[in-house]
């Protein structure tokens, strides 16, 4: 299927590692002009080399309001427009609610929620001007049900809610907003590899019990769905957050 993404200007936040890097690779393979963002410059450079193509890099911390503004203005200055924004940067902190400082709840919201809200607002005038655009927010299965850290669950749930609300608001301008909610994805920099190394038998049992597909997901399996959602082949998908989780979500059963 030709996704018709050749020459599209694409920005992937958190694109130097894991899921974000695989998403960037999938867009490169489609012939898009891809830019990746992250905080660590060495990691960005490594990913840029690995991804080849015409990938550009933008060092910015998406938890900083000022750096988010700088990121989008630099991207627009360099590319002239933005066709696709993938809000992928995210992560978890803290533990049980009782033991977690309030500050960490704020931090989790800044990284997993406010960054999405603000970056989406910042690209909006550019996409409106073009009369088209696509935003895909990487949330989590744990934004829909318990299982992850509480700070993370809260922030991802808010991101899923924003995806729907913002999609309704901007659809009349030809802009589609959607999300992907991954289940447990195994890759070299993610949390699951650390948990697997620490407790191989426990994690093996977890996979057997919790994931009907019988294994962890791969970063490519997330990326495939993201590029499809971002493309015009998904023109009638608006405000959806798709679970990509090997059946791990129990919500529809
Ligand atoms: P990862 O391996 O930890 O990579 C995170 C990426 O985001 C890196 O490129 C990192 O680069 C960047 N990043 C982190 N904080 C940032 C910040 N403040 N500003 C800018 N960039 C930042 O994570 P992942 O497993 O690929 O996860 C990617 C997304 O999928 C996240 O939103 C995560 O919540 C979601 N997800 C993952 C799983 C899973 O099983 N892996 C499951 C469900 C959802 P720097 O550190 O250099 O900034």
Image (cartoon, grey):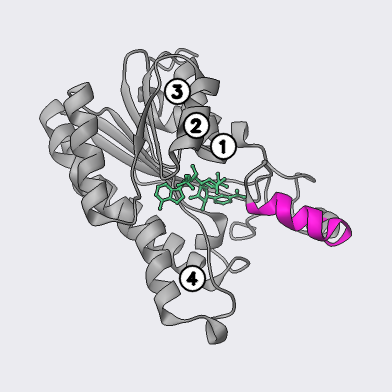
Going from the N terminus, do you reach mark 1 or mark 4 first?
4
Query: Tag count in the figure?
Result: 4
Queried on whether the Cβ of the residue with tag 1 lies below 8 angstroms from ligand 1, the answer reads: yes
- Left or right of 132: which side holds 115? right
Instruction: Count neighbours of disc 1 (C-alpha within 10 A) and say few if under 14, some if 14 to 19, many if 20 or more.
Output: many
Q: Please give left or right for residue 71 compared with residue 156 in the image.
A: left
Evaluate if marks 1 and 2 touch, with contact meaning CB atoms under 8 Å apart. Answer: yes
The image's mark for residue 186 is: none
Tag 2–tag 4 contact (CB < 8 Å):
no
Structural distance between the alpha carbons of marks 3 and 2:
6 Å
Query: Where in the figure is residue 86, as x and y percent of width and height?
Result: 38, 38
The residue that disc 2 covers is 23
The residue to which callout 3 is attached is 27
Foreground pick, 212 / 217:
217
* 26 left or right, relative to 35: right
Closer to us: mark 1 or mark 4?
4
Q: Mark 1 sits on what residue?
A: 222
- Which residue is pictured at 19% across the width and 30% down the height? 76
Q: Which type of secondary structure does the marked residue at label 1 adopt? A: helix
Q: Residue 173: x and y, percent?
A: 16, 36
Q: Nearer the viewer, residue 2 or 136?
A: 136
Are circles 3 and 2 on residues that touch, CB within 8 Å?
A: yes
Decide: few, some or many residues near mark 4? Use Cα within 10 Å; few <14, some 14-19, many ≥20: many
**Secondary structure type for disc 4:** helix
What residue is shown at x 48% (from left), y 35% (from top)? 42
Q: Residue at x 20, y 46 (%)?
A: 69
- Which SS type dominates the magenta stretch? helix
Where disc 2 sits, the SS reads: helix
Q: What residue is disc 4 on?
A: 151
Front in this rendered view, residue 100 or 84? 100
Residue bounds of the magenta highlight: 191-203
Mark 3 → mark 4, Cα distance in angstroms: 31 Å
């Amino acid at each position: 299927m030709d996704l018709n993404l050749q020459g599209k200007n694409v920005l992937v936040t958190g694109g130097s590692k894991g899921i974000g890097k695989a998403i960037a690779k999938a867009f490169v393979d489609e012939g898009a002009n891809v830019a990746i963002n992250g905080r660590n410059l060495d990691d960005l450079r490594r990913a840029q080399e690995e991804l080849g193509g015409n990938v550009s890099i933008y060092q910015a911390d998406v938890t900083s309001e000022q750096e988010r503004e700088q990121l989008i203005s630099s991207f627009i200055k360099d590319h002239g427009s933005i066709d696709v924004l993938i809000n992928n940067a995210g992560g978890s902190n803290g533990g049980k609610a009782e033991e977690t400082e309030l500050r960490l709840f704020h931090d989790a919201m800044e990284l997993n929620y406010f960054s999405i809200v603000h970056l989406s607002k910042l690209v909006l005038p550019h996409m409106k001007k073009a009369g088209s655009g696509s935003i895909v927010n990487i949330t989590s299965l744990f934004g829909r049900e318990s299982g992850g850290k509480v700070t993370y669950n809260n922030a991802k749930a808010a991101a899923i809610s924003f995806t729907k609300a913002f999609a309704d608001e901007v659809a009349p301008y030809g802009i589609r907003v959607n999300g992907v909610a991954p289940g447990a994805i195994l890759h070299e920099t993610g949390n699951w590899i650390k948990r697997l190394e620490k407790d191989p038998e426990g994690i093996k049992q977890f996979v057997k019990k919790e994931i009907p597909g019988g294994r962890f997901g791969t970063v490519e399996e997330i990326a495939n769905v993201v590029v499809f959602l971002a493309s015009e082949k998904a023109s009638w998908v608006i405000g959806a957050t798709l679970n990509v989780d090997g059946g791990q979500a129990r919500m529809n059963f």
